Image (cartoon, helix red, strand yellow):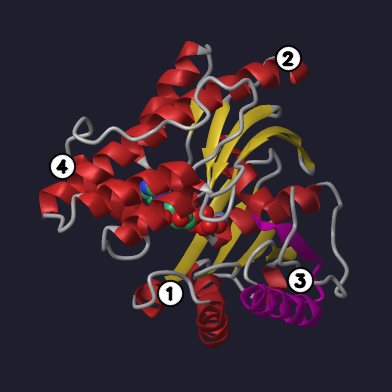
C-alpha cells in the first residue's frame, strides 16, 4: 500500500510518499518539506495570508519532488491523503483542493486526515507502537494529553487552559528578540544559560487534572525581562534556561498525572508517546524519559523531523485509515477547527 500525504495547515509546505507492507510496517519513501520561515520571520509569527499564497506557489513543486524522490507516479498510489484541518484555512484549502485534483485524475481514494490525528499516530510509523498509549501532543496550536485507544478513538485527558506550549516558547522567543520560531531558538539559548538565576512559576503543579496553563508563566518571563532590560546575550540565555526549566517541571508533573488518569480509566498503556513540534525539545524529551521509566514505561519519541509538521505523518495517518476502509468523499470540506 502506497499513499501520498500533503500537509499545508501552517507554515510548512510538505508532501511525502509512505509505503506500508502486508504486516503493517511503514517505510518513508520520500519526505519533501519546504519551510516558510523566511517569509514570516520579519513579522515574528505566521501571517495567514502570506502562508496561503506561499503554499499555492510551491505545493505543486513539493508534490513533484516527493513523487520523484519516491520514484513513484500517481498511478502507483493507493490513496491521496491530506491534512483537511485543523489549521489556517487558506493553506488547508490549497492542500485539500490539490489532493482532490490528484485523487480525481488518478482515480484513487481521498483520505482527509485530521492534522492532530496524524501527529498522534506518527509513533506507529516510526516505532510500531500498539494501542492503547498515552500521548503528549504539544505543538504551536495545541497542547493535550490523550489516551490513544485506536484509529479515530482518542480521549482527551488534559488540555491547556490558555496558551499552547509551542506558542509559549514562540512568545518568549519573540519578547527576547530571538528569531522566529522561538521554540528551537529558546532551546538553543537555554543550553548555555543558567537555569537557577531566574525562578519562574510552575503553574498547575500538583493539580489532579492533567491540564496546563502557560500564559502566567509567559507573563512572568515578560515582567522579568522588562525589569532586567536592556538584556545582554548572557541575560537572554539565562531567561531562556529559567523558562525552559519551568516548562520541563510542569510537563513532567502534568504527564505523570496524565498517566495515572489513563491507568484509572483504560488500564495499562503500552507506552508514553510524545508528538508535535515541541516534542523535538531535548530537555522535554529527557524529563519525559525519566517520568516514563518511573512509571515502568518506555518513552517513544519520533525523530525531530517527524515531530514538526511533515507530509509523512499525513500519509501514514491516511494509510491507517485506508486499512480500515475509512475513505472520504471528494466533497469533503476544509476545517479551520477540528478537535480530535
Ligand atoms: O507541530 P508543529 O510543527 O506545528 C503545529 O502544528 O503547530 O509545531 C510547531 C511548534 C512551534 O511553536 C515551535 O516553536 C515548536 O513547535 N518547536 C519547539 C522546538 N521545535 C519546534 N519548541 C520547543 N523546542 C523545540 N526544539
Ligand atoms: Zn503540527
Residue labelled with disc 1? 36
Q: Quadrant of residue 59?
A: bottom right
Asked if residue 279 can be seen in this view, the reply is: no
Residue in view at x 49 percent, y 42 percent: 214
Ligand 2 occupies quarter: bottom right
Residue labelled with disc 4? 192
Q: Residues within 10 Å of mark 2 (few under 14, many from 20)?
A: few
Mark 2 or mark 1: name the one nearer the start of the chain: 1
Q: Which is more toward the observer, 266 or 209?
A: 209
Residue labelled with disc 3? 334
Q: Which is more toward the observer, 332 or 19?
A: 332
Name the secondary structure under disc 4: loop
Camera-near label (4 vs 3) is: 4
Mark 2 vs mark 4, CA separation in Å: 41 Å
Mark 2 vs mark 1, CA separation in Å: 43 Å
The residue segment tinted magenta is: 89-115
Q: Quadrant of the N terminus?
A: bottom right
In the displayed structure, 50 sits above or below 152; it is below
Where residue 129 appears, as percent x and y from the top left, is: 61, 31
Mark 4 vs mark 3, CA separation in Å: 43 Å
In the displayed structure, 282 sits above or below 171; it is above
Q: Residues within 10 Å of mark 1 (few under 14, many from 20)?
A: some
Is residue 139 left or right of 23 when viewed as pictured?
left
In the displayed structure, 259 sits above or below 130; it is above
Residue labelled with disc 2? 264
Amino acid at each position: 500500500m502506497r499513499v501520498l500525504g500533503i500537509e499545508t495547515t501552517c507554515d510548512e509546505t510538505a508532501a511525502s510518499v509512505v509505503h506500508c507492507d502486508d504486516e503493517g510496517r511503514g517505510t518513508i519513501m520520500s519526505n519533501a518539506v519546504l519551510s516558510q520561515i523566511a517569509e514570516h520571520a520579519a513579522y515574528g509569527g505566521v501571517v495567514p495570508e502570506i502562508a496561503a499564497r506561499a503554499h499555492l506557489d510551491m505545493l505543486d513543486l513539493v508534490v513533484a519532488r516527493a513523487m520523484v524522490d519516491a520514484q513513484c507516479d500517481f498511478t502507483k498510489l493507493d490513496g491521496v491523503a491530506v491534512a483537511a484541518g485543523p489549521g489556517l484555512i487558506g493553506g488547508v484549502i490549497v492542500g485539500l483542493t490539490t489532493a482532490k485534483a490528484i485523487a480525481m485524475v488518478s482515480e484513487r481514494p481521498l483520505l482527509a486526515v485530521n492534522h492532530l490525528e496524524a501527529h498522534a499516530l506518527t509513533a506507529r510509523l516510526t516505532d510500531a507502537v500498539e494501542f492503547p498509549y498515552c500521548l503528549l501532543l504539544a505543538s504551536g496550536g495545541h497542547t493535550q494529553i490523550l489516551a490513544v485507544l485506536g484509529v479515530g478513538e482518542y480521549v482527551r485527558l488534559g488540555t491547556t487552559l490558555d496558551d499552547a506550549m509551542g506558542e509559549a516558547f514562540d512568545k518568549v522567543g519573540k519578547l527576547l528578540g530571538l528569531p522566529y520560531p522561538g521554540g528551537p531558538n529558546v532551546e538553543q539559548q537555554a543550553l548555555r544559560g543558567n537555569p537557577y538565576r531566574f525562578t519562574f512559576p510552575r503553574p498547575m503543579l500538583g493539580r489532579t487534572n492533567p491540564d496546563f496553563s502557560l500564559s502566567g508563566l509567559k507573563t512572568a518571563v515578560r515582567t522579568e525581562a522588562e525589569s532586567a532590560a536592556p538584556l545582554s546575550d548572557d541575560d537572554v540565555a539565562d531567561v531562556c534556561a529559567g523558562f525552559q526549566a519551568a516548562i520541563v517541571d510542569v510537563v513532567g508533573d502534568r504527564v505523570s498525572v496524565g498517566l495515572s488518569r489513563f491507568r484509572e480509566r483504560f488500564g495499562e498503556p503500552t507506552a508514553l508517546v510524545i508528538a508535535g513540534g515541541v516534542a523535538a525539545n531535548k530537555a522535554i524529551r529527557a524529563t519525559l524519559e525519566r517520568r516514563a521509566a518511573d512509571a515502568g514505561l518506555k518513552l517513544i519519541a519520533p525523530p525531530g523531523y517527524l515531530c514538526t509538521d511533515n507530509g509523512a505523518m499525513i500519509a501514514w495517518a491516511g494509510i491507517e485509515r485506508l486499512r480500515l476502509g475509512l475513505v472520504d468523499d471528494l466533497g469533503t470540506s476544509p476545517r479551520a477547527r477540528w478537535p480530535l
